Amino acid sequence: MSDQNKLKLETNALNTWCPGCGNFGILFAFKKAISSLIQEGTPRENIVLSSGIGCSSKIVDYLNLNSFCSLHGRPLAIAEGVKIANPKLKVIVFAGDGGTYNEGISHLIHAAKRNIDLTVLVHDNRCFALTTGQFTATSPQGFKGKSTPQGSREEPFDPLRLMLASNASFIARGYSGKIVHLQKIISAALKHPGFSFVNILQPCVSFFNTTDFYNQRVYEMKDCDLGSRQKALAKMQEWNYQENEKKIPLGIFLQVKRPVY
Amino acid sequence: MEKDFSIIIGGAAGQGSRRAGLLIAKAFQSLGYYVFVYDEYQSLVRGGHSFSSIRVSSTKKNSSSSEIDFLIALDQRTWEEHRHSLKKEGQVFYNHDYFQIEKEKRAQGIVATQIVEKEKGKKIMENISLVAFFLGSLGFSEEALKTLFRKEFNKFQEINLKIAQKSFEKSILIKKIPLRKKKQEFSLLTGNQALAQGAIKAGLEFYFAYPMTPATGILHYLAGSTGRKAGIKTVQMENELAVANAALGSAYAGKPTMLATSGGGLALMGEAFSLGVQAEIPLLFINSQRPAPASGVPTYTAQGDLSFSLGLGHGDIVKFLVAPGDAEEAAYWAGKLLSLSWEYQTPSLLLIDKQISESTFSFDPEILKKISPIQIFPQSKNKSLNYQRYEITKNGTSSLAFPGQKGIVVKANSYEHLENGLTTEQEIEIQKMQDKRLRKYQAMQKVVNQVDAVKVYGNKKSSQAILVWGSTKGPAREVAEELKIKMIQPLFLEPFPEKRIKAALQGVEHLVLIEGNALGQLEGLLKSYQIIPQEKILKYNSRPFLASEIKAALNKIYKNERSK
């Protein structure tokens, strides 16, 4: 291990997430995954993190790695520019459901279509948290927030199926409460050549505490045929991001080879 | 003898009038003349009416004439639209198979459709027939024509040459345009192509774009053989938001990057522009104006985005804004602004318009020699362990490093930040960082005093002056020289070249502002520096100023002054 790689991963920034926030689990899993990537030989100076605005995006302040904290909804576009300009770099996007599925959804779809070699980690707490609790694209119908006191009228969409339709070559779902499993998914995503997408379910302890909901429903999928779009779709359809009793499969749904942008 | 004459060739979209216009321009350029081609077309793919207006002159002119000497009508509408601009002693050349011009001594018809059909050519080649017929009438030799067409056509060369020869044989010599002694070699470039050349010279590597008229030509040029030969990588993204942000990412990764759009696209990029300022990312934005508000008149020209460009970006914005007035200035300032952006680590905006972007100029490539490549000094290794992207310095600029450099962590941030790039909300730190950017701006203001930020033309001693910016330079300069008055052209609009303009205004008692918008947008800026024009001439019908219009308006103003 070189001196460089011995440098600590943490910064001295004060963490401002709420106690019990799901982001801690994601940060922990990512640190494990990226450390092993560095140990396996990826030079740490070649790692670039891109984030937007929201609780999720604060993560780059807590990681002593190259980073570009950009605008709400735009970290994917920034990341694409970085990767296109210097293909040697390993580029990872951190963003929330609001930024990714509301504000910046066009970039997600097109990045998947291009199969550009990036990893996108969506911290999906299924609400806008930093703006104190409004519904997003993945909030369940009936979500009660300050903008929808009588409950949101809109049904959520399923980001996994959106990614399947957009021809993403790596689609996975993790849970911030299952850190070891999440770390394995992130590691696999980081090693995937092409566009890798991980939707990470995460409770928002302040505005949408889904901890019990997820703990009762999530299960780790057994290794399945990662090359089958039909099987991936069938697994995705087990849960539709609504409030119901359905079990929620976690793991990698699809991993296929496509020409990389 | 001084020569200055104009040709209009027109037809429906799809009849190849633009290509034909360019051929004619090249023909006269080969005789040693300066040419300026203004293209007018509608926002449609087939039909309608498009034309090219070609001005040929022995001294350089960058504007069109109101009267034309030669009209070439590929269809009847061209004749109807432009017959009133044809000089008494002018000539019209037209396709006799489509319509007849009767009782008109100035008309010369040719059976272009029949000639093309006989040679089994494509319908669009009627334009070749008319061009050859026209050039024959002005004394071009058959050999000169063949040389030109051989150079221009790779595809269907033989058919084109045959059509040209048959049409040439039918021409009757009207007058011979003499060969001029060439002083230097010029290329024929649009403003879009010229500015791309300038940026390439400065070291451009990446170009991000979403198509929008009139900036699209830059994308096509850089994606084509010229750009590829220069090693430029072009990327078409899903929308302007993606373009601006990806371009910021590319520059953050260390690559000289440029993007171009028109007003509507720039409006979408405003947030990213502000991010560029806050994160101190060097990036060159081009705004090629077209008539607005909103979609406006997409394929025509205007100078209506000045206020918008001055105000671009939310917050305290630190930027360069330069408005070149012709293709050479566009080339020079595209290169220079790219360099300045990198030197001061902040975005720049080059403001042009359709008139510059899509008109074709006799371009003097000498100007490119004045553009030096961007200097990027990588962070030295011994200082690297404590690298801070936003280190507070005396002049406000911090050393620039890029991801991928061993031992360095580069943290860019859209939030207000500490020297190391981490987010802050502490008032002392916020003030420090704002002050750092302000010191950069002060240094940028000094740059304006060191370069040609303001140009003066015409009679420099005159107490009567006109003040123009951007493409209005072309026609205004002709008028200033003719009326022997002073013309002042600010190239820099931000930082504003106050000292330079005030120096140029020394001895001026009467000032007329001329610009292509309805509100007189530059006037507001001038007034904030206590520069008060006595009168203004505004044009906002989507067409560029003509020298004759400016001259008439000025004469009226001066006549009123005298009778006061």
Image (tube, rainbow, N blue to C red):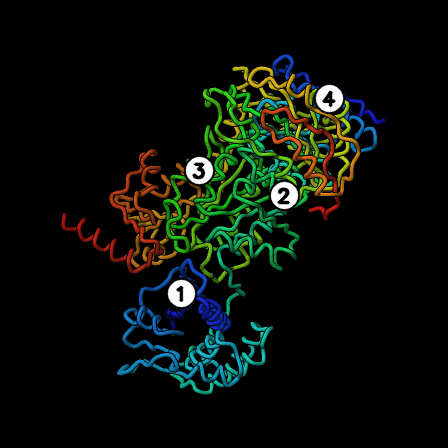
| Residue B539 visible in the snapshot | yes
| Residue B339 x, y percent position in the rendering | 57, 42
Confirm or deny contact between disc 1 and disc 4 (CB under 8 A): no
Q: Does mark 3 fall on the same chain as mark 1?
A: yes
Q: Residues within 10 Å of mark 3 (few under 14, many from 20)?
A: many
Secondary-structure class at tag 1: strand
Q: Which residue is mark 2?
A: A165
Q: Which residue is mark 3?
A: B494
Relative to the observer, which residue lies in front, A184 or A234? Answer: A234
Relative to the observer, which residue lies in front, B500 or A1? Answer: A1
Residue B486, compared with residue B408, is above or below; it is: below
Mark in the foreground, 1 or 3: 1
Q: Which mark is residue B50?
A: 1
Mark in the foreground, 2 or 1: 2
User: Quarter-wise, where is residue A160 in the image?
Assistant: top right
Q: Is residue B94 left or right of residue B246?
A: left
Residue type beneath disc 4: Lys
Residue B516, compared with residue A142, is above or below; it is: below
Mark 1 and mark 3 lie on one chain; the one further toward the N terminus is 1
| Residue A236 x, y percent position in the rendering | 67, 35
